[in-house]
Amino acid sequence: MKKSFYVTTPIYYVNDKPHIGHAYTTLLADVLARYHRLLGDPTLFLTGTDEHGQKVQRAADRAGVTPQEQADTTVVRFQELWKKLGITHDDFIRTTEPRHARVVQRILQDLYDRDEIYRSEYDGWYCVPCERFFMEKDLRENTCPECGRAVEHITESNYFFRMGKYQDWLVRYIQEHPTFIQPDFRRNETLGFLRRGLNDLCISRPKTRLAWGIELPFDSDYVTYVWFDALVNYISAIGYLADDARFRQWWPATYHLIGKDILTTHTVYWPTMLKAMGVAMPETVFAHGWWLVEESKMSKSLGNVVNPMEMADRYGVDAFRYFLMAEMTLGQDANFSEESFVRRYNTYLANDLGNLLSRVMKLVASHCGGRVPAPGQPGPDEEHLRDATLAASAAMEKAVNDMRLDVGLAEVAGAVREANRYLERRQPWTLAKQADAGPLGTVLYSAAESLRIVSGLLYPTMPAKMTALRQTLGLSQTKPDMAELKAWGKLPPGTAVGEMTALFPRVKLEREPETKQTRKEPEMEGVVEFSDFKKLDLRTARVLAADKVEGADKLLRLQVEIGGETRQIVAGIARHYSPEQMAGRTIVVVVNLKPAKIRGVESNGMLLAAVAGEDMLRLVTIDGDIPSGTRVQ
């Protein structure tokens, strides 16, 4: 029996409408779930909403409605967005549902009966947005150390979970299970937090201050702390204390996907709660970064929050899905702008993938009677295209397992570019004029077969568009067979292709640039706009191999790895660096430069170097280890 795949998102607060951060985590879970379903793995994808707590109560008060009415109104925004974005969650849990509240109360009663929960006086500082207490020593200039907002001083009697007694156990568990918290630097962050000492956790709120929550089963004057309630959703949804067989089928979770701002609750509170309950740990808690705008975190006060509904309406759902998955390196922050969205869309989707499909289908329709031609004996060019496409398939599978979807998608984009280069080399439009139709059939079949594999690899990310592409290829099975994506030659010759459509028509930036009323500065010679500089895509690259270009004293031919993609770059550095000196270096490369031929050798990118006269040249390199393909900003 195949191992089950259980992926969760955080459950989202219903105090406001969803933003790009909510969309990203949920889309990431959806793409992973789709991949594993295609692999035949039993898969469960859980998301939902967190509907208790002070933030929800205050939002309801501002709206002049009850907290339940606030939750019922706002939850629809999430449900509608997930439907629009094609989210295929298997369950959507709300913490106001009886199935969840019953489990929370049974857990609380059990822990209280076993003296894991006790009552005590509390005097300290409370942050409403984070819904957490902090010691005075933890405050930063009298503000919340997590969000930086004002805190309130509170003295009251409350109930506490004996979290502190699990500190040493948790440190050992994290050290002995290196994949429990990912990426690695988040694991180190949690260990650093634990070294400062772990206090017991206040898990109640008096109804005199907060009435909106799950009532403590052993004291009706109190409700449950929102995080002690919310985290339980991961097990209440799959039958904990209600359906043992179902719970055993899905637990432990494969991935808890979270934003880095809720790392402590998921890597300290949650595992200590599970330990006290006698429940196994989830396999991995994976914390991704934030989406930034002009290097600043999105916030309503700054007015820079991206509305995913608007982006999907403006540019299409699948293009939006693709951008989010391709742009962010999991674990790191990523910068969002409509300009970068449109640039990636036009470059990778319209120019490369859309253009490849259009070229092939037009030639098949006009010269092959609308049917996929039979290939002849493959030559070196066909073998190269086959190898590049199958390498992308292997890289995508590895990227899913390594949680590096951006790397996998970059490799697929490289295979599409290779297919376009293949057409440029083989010139099928010229072959169509020859009497012998064999070479043309070989070229068109090879390009169409590459599209078959690419469409399958991109299907979990862009399901609607890849379904359309596969229908255009004449494939009756719109959902790909993952095993067939590892084999060449599975597209049956003679297949009738479908009607040709513009898969990704080019788009223009619809949002008008913001105008600022400022005094006109004197023009400076050689100065460029920041928007022009942002057009350059600078990435780290690891040099795999290097050799001299024959007949050129200054040129080295470099094979470099850029986030899983291998490229060839020709650089005029041979008088300053030998091939042996280059191998293994991490350099900085302009990756979106138009390919060019230098002395007859194709160069796909340009490295950066500092030059002083003719005698001194130094490469721009990176201080310390960092993955290849990392954006340089």
Image (spheres, rainbow, N blue to C red):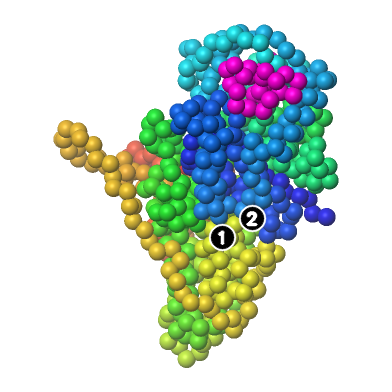
Q: Residue at x 32, y 48 (%)?
A: 511
Is residue 32 depicted above or below 523 in this figure?
A: below
Q: Is residue 404 visible?
A: yes
Label 2 Cα crowd, 10 Å radius (few <14 / some 14-19 / many 20+): many
Please name the residue that numbered disc 1 is placed on: 463
In the image: residue 498, left or right of residue 250: left
Label 1 Cα crowd, 10 Å radius (few <14 / some 14-19 / many 20+): many
Magenta residues (range): 197-226
Please name the residue that numbered disc 2 is placed on: 34
Q: Residue at x 59, y 81 (%)?
A: 495
Residue type at tag 2: Arg
Residue type at tag 1: Pro
Q: Determine contact: label 1, label 2, CB under 8 Å.
A: yes
Q: Residue at x 57, y 11 (%)?
A: 154
Q: Nearer the viewer, residue 19 or 170?
A: 19
Q: Is residue 172 visible?
A: no
- Residue 205, given in percent of the width and then of the height, sits at 63, 19
The quadrant of the picture occupied by the C terminus is: top left
Secondary structure found at label 2: helix
Q: Residue at x 73, y 31 (%)?
A: 104
Secondary structure found at label 1: helix
Residue 26 included in the magenta stretch of the image: no
Quadrant in the picture for residue 348: bottom left
Q: Which mark is residue 17?
A: none
Work out whether mark 1 precedes mark 2 in sequence or the reverse, and give the earlier one. 2
- Residue 125, given in percent of the width and then of the height, sits at 56, 13
Query: How many callouts does the rendering have?
Result: 2
The quadrant of the picture occupied by the N terminus is: bottom right
